[in-house]
Every structure is written in C-alpha cells, then in structure tokens.
Image: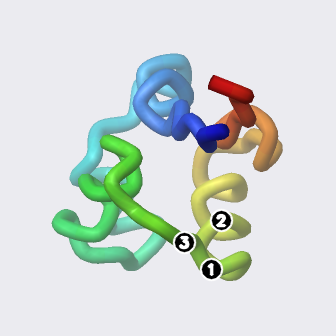
Amino acid sequence: MAIIVNLDVMMATRKMSLNELSETVNISLANLSKLKTGKVKAIRFSTLEAVCEALDCQPGDILEYSKD
C-alpha cells in the first residue's frame, strides 16, 4: 500500500512554481520539496488545507491511494 503525492501534477496544472507555492502557503522550500517528491511520512491537515486553497483543488487531487 502506498499514498502517492500528485502535488507536482497540480502545480503544473495551475502553472504555479515551487517558490510561488512556498510563499503563498508559508512553508519552507525544503519541506514543500519533500512533500512534492513524496518523501514525507505525514502531512498536517492545516498544511493540506493551505495547499488546496492555494491550488484551488481538493485533497484527493493531491493525494492518491494505491494498493501496490
């Protein structure tokens, strides 16, 4: 089982760079980069909410569950 992070897809769809999202959401580039590459073990709901608001999307647009 795995949770797949599609943050890069949503950022590309919204034409938003990592720097722009970092500034908008007020999260460090390092932490946002880890989230984007899926190298995180957890995400706070407040962070997820801020990212969804900035990208005008739903949590399911960013996170995906895979049985593999």
Vertical order, 6 against 18 (above or below): above
Give the number of the disc on residue 48. Answer: 2
Label 3 sits on a secondary structure element that is loop
Q: Quadrant of the N terminus?
A: top right
- 65 vs 62, left or right, is right
The answer to which quarter of the image holds residue 55 is top right
Amino acid, disc 1: Arg
Circles 3, 1 touching at the beta carbon (< 8 Å): yes
Residue at 31% of width from left, 42% of height from top?
Answer: 37
Reading the image, the residue beneath label 3 is 42
The kind of residue tagged 2 is: Leu
Tell me the residue that label 1 is attached to.
44
Q: Which quadrant does the C terminus fall into?
A: top right
Residue 2 is drawn in which quadrant? top right
Q: Residue at x 55, y 29 (%)?
A: 10
Residue furthest out toward the left: 30
Q: How is the image coloured?
A: rainbow
